[in-house]
Image (cartoon, helix red, strand yellow):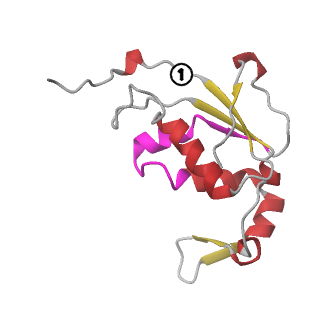
């Protein structure tokens, strides 16, 4: 018996709406990454982008458990000697609340061009409003 491989033309994409209010960041990111990859579908194929579009609202109200909100630090390097920059979670959540969720999801996707294509299907908004009403996204309850 042969293994079935999905072709890119056979993939149908849906739109999902996720509310991030008072949801732990890691649990939110893992389930959003699963939707973006398409692992919830029976036609999942690892080398094909079979995932759906995901809209995340209320990104500024996401929470961390324990004392991570005070201790978590995001690092990036400028490329120059001594160019290591550090920003704590609280500051980053105030300045760029969408970055926190996008970065958590990005780190859970494949680290290649397929993962970059999947990340383009993620739409994150700081507040409760989004401009994707025409796509009729289905609200989804996350398993916590």
Farthest residue in the bottom direction? 82
Let me know if residue 103 appears in the view: no
Q: Quadrant of the N terminus?
A: top left
Dot 1, crowdedness within 10 Å: few (<14), some or many (≥20)? Answer: few
Residue 73 at what x, y percent from top left?
A: 67, 74
Taking the spot 52% from the left edge, 56% from the top edge, the residue there is 107
Look at mark 1 in the image and give the residue it sits on. 13
In the image, residue 81 above or below residue 65: below
Q: Secondary structure at mark 1?
A: loop
In front: 112, or 5?
5
Horizontally, residue 132 falls left or right of residue 102, namely: right
Horizontally, residue 46 falls left or right of residue 118, namely: left
In front: 135, or 65?
65
Tell me the quarter of the picture where residue 50 sits. Answer: top left
Which stretch is magenta? 106-125
Tally of marks: 1
Taking the spot 41% from the left edge, 43% from the top edge, the residue there is 113
């Amino acid at each position: 018996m042969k293994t079935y491989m999905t072709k890119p033309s056979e993939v149908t994409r849906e739109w999902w709406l996720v509310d991030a209010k008072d949801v732990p960041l890691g649990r939110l990111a893992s389930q959003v990454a699963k939707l973006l990859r398409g692992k919830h579908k029976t036609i999942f194929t690892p080398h094909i982008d079979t995932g759906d579009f995901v809209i995340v609202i209320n990104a500024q109200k996401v929470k961390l458990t324990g004392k991570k909100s005070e201790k978590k630090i995001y690092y990036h390097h400028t490329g120059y000697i001594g160019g290591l920059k550090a920003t704590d979670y609280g500051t980053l959540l105030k300045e760029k609340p969408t970055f926190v969720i996008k970065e958590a999801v990005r780190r859970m996707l494949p680290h290649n061009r397929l993962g970059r294509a999947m990340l383009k299907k993620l739409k994150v908004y700081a507040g409760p409003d989004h401009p994707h009403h025409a796509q009729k996204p289905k609200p989804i309850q996350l398993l916590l």
